[in-house]
Amino acid sequence: MSAEEEPSAHKRTASSTSALPSPPPAKRTPNNLPPNRRTFPHAVALVFYRDGEDSTSSTSVLGVYADLADANDKVRKLAEEQGSPLEASRNDLEPARWSAPDGAACWVEVHVVTPKKIVKREVSPKEEPVKKLYDSEEGEDPDVEEEEGGHYD
């Protein structure tokens, strides 16, 4: 291959393997966004673990996942570690759950997350007045009282 053929071959390879062009995020229409990012409410899957069934047991949140399948995978891995493996579900439409004979349990709960308010991008934050460290006028020492006369002992 000559030196003249290499750049064209490189350009041809680079252009044929480059990703499809997509508009920048700010220019995307809502229809181009992934389905779970279009509108609220969003849902999150929480993975809970309870360490026993008596009154001294505690329940902990082990993770928060945006996808139910990821949360179910975490529960399956924990079940396998505890010695009571779960069978893998193909559709992952239902939250996974397992319980051990000693009372330990792990499960997934799906919760909807809705924002209090959605602020438009055009809205700028309120201009707040500059806060001063002291209320006194410039040049005055707030720790020195008039009767002390500025003398320190």
Image (cartoon, rainbow, N blue to C red):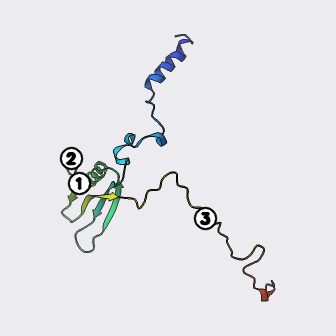
SS label for mark 1: loop
Between 72 and 121, the one lying in front of the other is 121
Q: Residue 3 sits in which quadrant?
A: top right
Residues at marks 3 and 2 touching, judged by CB atoms closer than 8 Å:
no
Quadrant holding the C terminus: bottom right
Between discs 2 and 1, the one toward the N terminus: 2
Between 11 and 3, the one lying in front of the other is 11
The residue mark sitting in front, 1 or 3, is 3
Where is residue 147 drawn, in percent x and y? 78, 89
Residue matched to label 1 = 96
Residue matched to label 3 = 128
Between 84 and 16, the one lying in front of the other is 16
Residues at marks 2 and 1 touching, judged by CB atoms closer than 8 Å:
yes
Where is residue 79 drawn, in percent x and y? 24, 55
Residue 48 - label: none
SS label for mark 3: loop
SS label for mark 2: loop
Between discs 1 and 3, the one toward the N terminus: 1
Label 3 neighbourhood size at 10 Å, few (<14), some (14-19), many (20+)?
A: few
State left or right for residue 118 relative to residue 92: right
Q: Which residue is drawn at the image coordinates 27% and 70% (left, top)?
A: 57
The residue mark sitting in front, 3 or 2, is 3
Which kind of residue does numbered mark 1 sit on?
Ala
Q: Is residue 110 above or below residue 32?
A: below
Residue 89 - label: 2
Where is residue 118 drawn, in percent x and y? 44, 56
Gap between marks 3 and 2, in whole Å? 54 Å
Q: Which residue is drawn at the image coordinates 45% and 27% (left, top)?
A: 18
